[in-house]
Image (cartoon, grey):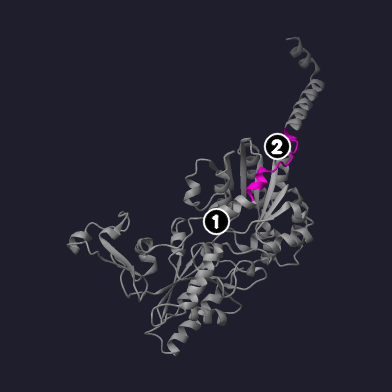
Amino acid sequence: MKKMEVAVLVLGDIGRSPRMQYHCMSLSTMENVETVYFVGIEGEGCVPGLEMDPKIEKRTIREPYTKNLPRWMYLLSLPVKIFQQMLQLFLILMFSIGSSEYILVQNPPCIPTFVIVKLVAWLRGIKVIIDWHNLGFSVLALKLGENHPLVLVARIYEKVFAHIGDYHICVTRALKEWLCDSFSLSENKITVMYDKAPGFFHPRNVVEKHRLFYKLSDDLFSNGFGRCPATMYETPFTKATPSASANDEEENRGHYDPYTDDDPTTKFKLALKPDRPRLLISSTSWTPDEDFGILLDALAFLDRRITRDDLVDTFPLIICVVTGKGPQREMYEEKIAQLHLQHIFIRTMWLEAGDYPTLLGSCDLGVCLHTSTSGLDLPMKVVDMFGSGLPVCAVDFQCLPELVKHNVNGKIFKSDVQLADQLFELLSRDENGDNPELSKLREGVKDHNKERWQKQWLKKVKPIFETEIPRPWAMGYPLLFLMVAGLLFGVTKMFPTFSQSLLKR
């Protein structure tokens, strides 16, 4: 089988581009792929599996110097940002991705990605595959408004350069249909590859949960949560007691460390506390396309309802963890501080790449506030939550039912009041400590997880790289030859005497 190299490109923070990371790791499993070049903007760390893969090499682009300018200077700084990214991207794709046969490029952003990829593909004879996560012009419209002239220009640009792709991948059926109807792309050249969680997203056992809660205790259980201090042997969620084989509790305690003991159950029995709090999680980018105020209002309604219905002693305490980074984080943290909730504790955190899957697999319920700018893409955070065995309450938008099936693997809400009712229903416990509705949704999530990322990728995407797509004729070398020949011809015409003396030698 012919050996090849592949470049994977995302003009964004590579550490916050999980789908493209998964593409890299899947390409690395192909026997005939020697090297995968992961090109993107340097930022957060990638998942451990990618960082340790010897076949994957990162090629990073520096953040634009205009990144920290105020919002009112956005339009003025945009040309500088685009030029800087174009130059870096062109140099990397021309000279730092080996003899790559394919470029798999994420969209959005398409400005300036598409025009540079088109130029490099023409010069080097590289085949292009576009992975459509959303529509670039719709993201720009969120900042400038749908009728802004730049948005109209961006839509035309995206439509024209969409045809640089020899093949296309997209995240939903709705997006595929839109691309065929509005951008006139060939249906036969588009495949739908749903986001699926890789294997390291999965439900966690009590040992993994205990270790994580102990590690994150300062962030999770501080600032007013005083029910139980987190120690090496006990957290508000878990408790380690001496196993039946332990003769001396104090002696065995000295030998147990959640970080280093691979099998603490040989000396201690770890168990979840029956009266443990409920752990709710929401992952957000703190951007305008996610109205985080909906969750805050819902939690405020729920907190008042627990007090009003005299359920303070029976309804479990709730810890709501909100992970992510973004421009609106500080604004919402100020609002959180003003809520003065009695029964609910909200924690904002940014987790290491290795801790995030473990936390998802340790939670009871997830909340997603993502609303697509185009209505045609699906939230990756829900995919990760499902992979971790976690049912989700998600805000409704156009194609969400392709992922979240109401009352099957989650709940769909349209308002803060609906979300508050769903949280009350799913986070309560009956007299046996169970919640039948939550258990039913977990079974629905299990059914959704029968096909994981790698299995679907092998079926949908791998065949694209095995298809004999005619490789474009590389124009770079003929152009270089013509430039050198033209330069020599010019020298002979301008300095005939000098040229003749060289020929005589």
Percent position of residue 321, x then y: 46, 69
**Chief secondary structure of the magenta portion:** loop
Q: Which residue is mark 2?
A: 124
The residue beneath circle 1 is 16
Q: State the residue in front, 268 or 325.
A: 268
Magenta stretch holds residue 475: yes
| Residue at figure coordinates x 54%, y 60% from the top left | 450
With respect to residue 37, does 109 lie above or below? below
Which numbered disc, 2 or 1, marks the residue that appears first in the sequence?
A: 1
Q: Secondary structure at mark 2?
A: helix
Crowding at dot 2, Cα within 10 Å, few <14 / some 14-19 / many 20+, comes out as many
- Most distant residue in the top direction: 504
Height in image: 274 above or below 65? Answer: below
Q: Is residue 163 above or below residue 208?
A: above
User: How many neighbours does mark 1 have within 10 angstroms: few (below 14), some (14-19), or many (20 or more)?
Assistant: some
In the image, which residues are magenta? Answer: 461-476
Residue at x-position 17% and y-position 62%: 248
Residue 398 shows up from this direction: yes
Relative horizontal placement of residue 426, taking residue 371 as reference (left or right): left
Write down the quadrant of residue 94 in the picture.
top right
Asked whether residue 303 is drawn in magenta, I would say no
Q: Amino acid at mark 2?
A: Arg
Q: Which mark is residue 351?
A: none
The kind of residue on which mark 1 rests is Arg
User: Quick one: quadrant of the N terminus?
Assistant: top right
Q: Nearer the viewer, residue 396 or 153?
A: 396
Q: Residue at x 70, y 45 (%)?
A: 128
Q: Position of residue 480 (x, y in %)?
A: 73, 30
Q: Secondary structure at mark 1?
A: helix
Residue 307 in the image, given as x and y percentages of width and height: 43, 87
Residue 451 versus residue 372 in the image, above or below: above
Q: CA distance from mark 2 to mark 1?
A: 29 Å
